[in-house]
Image (tube, rainbow, N blue to C red):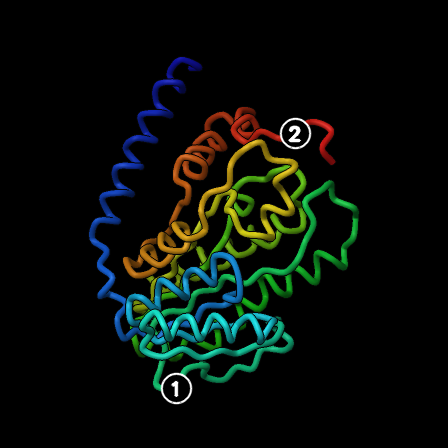
Amino acid sequence: MGRLQKILIPFLGLVLAFCFYSARENFKPEMLKGKRVIVTGASTGIGEQMAYHLARMGAHVLVTARTEAKLQKVVERCRELGAGSAQLVSGTLSHHTLTPAPLLSGGLDMLILNHVGKSYFSYFDGDVRHIQKLLDINFLSYVAMTVSALPMLKQSGGSIVVVSSMAGKVGFPFTVPYSATKFALDGFFSSLRQEFSIQNVNVSITLCILSFIDTESAVRAAADVLQMSPAPKEECALEIIKGGALRQREVYYKYTLTKIPLLLRDWAAELTPSLFHFRNNSL
């Protein structure tokens, strides 16, 4: 059985990679021209880069995040890059503070949920309140924004893009609160997708499974613990947009660092931690 796994895992990985990269060839930037898109968590990192890609493609972009000054710079840059229009909404996103009102006049074609609350990268410290707060930002606000946006998305036959993580598919050490919120996203949106199919609701849901990305927050939290190089946020942002435009069920980035561990999780769970090299005595 061990020899069979050694043969099957690389083979399936190659097959899945071929299917994945073949699907990407159908993407054309013109797909986003004139589309009305909301990007949350867009003041820095992956969200900021998504806003710039969308602007280059001629989309109408609305960006949200906590810091208005940073968002203003993002909006100015989007306009310079050729966005159909660029707007901002600043403030903390939680299900308590979210206003269930249309965020774009005239409708909505794509909702990209990318914001995330601050957490730690260390052993679980038993702080239940921290998990509750993180669930509010990382999960419940995603649900609330989806509910708010659904009437517009149903009208346009639009898309919901949910930025998640490998930590939402596989349990890793040092990410207990964060992982809990990402698993919740997977459960909610995967189930909601099934209900949309049963009800013939023409709204796609794309769940994005990301590896270690070179955002400032991720590098600051994990660079001293993970013995691996982070993937570029610019490329990651583009892959997320492509997946949403193509209405893919899931996006894996980087592919070998996300999809292959999921195969191992199901077939050889004891090997999964070996793919992510943690530094000894680093915490």
For the point 26% across and 40% down, the residue is: 19
Looking at the rendered structure, which numbered label has been put on residue 279? 2
Image position, residue 55 (x, y; %): 35, 69
Q: Residues within 10 Å of mark 1 (few under 14, many from 20)?
A: few
- Please state if 4 lies on the left or on the right of 267 as rendered: left
For the point 74% across and 44% down, the residue is: 124
SS for tag 1? loop
The image quadrant of residue 105 is bottom left
Image mark count: 2
The image quadrant of residue 157 is bottom left
Q: Amino acid at mark 1?
A: Ser
Counting residues from the start of the chain, the first of labels 2 and 1 encountered is: 1
Image position, residue 96 (x, y; %): 64, 76
Task: Please name whichever residue, 142 or 41, is drawn nearer the observer in this view of the structure.
Answer: 41
Q: Disc 1 designates what residue? A: 105
Whether residue 199 is visible, yes or no, is no
Q: Residue furthest right?
A: 126
The image quadrant of residue 240 is bottom left
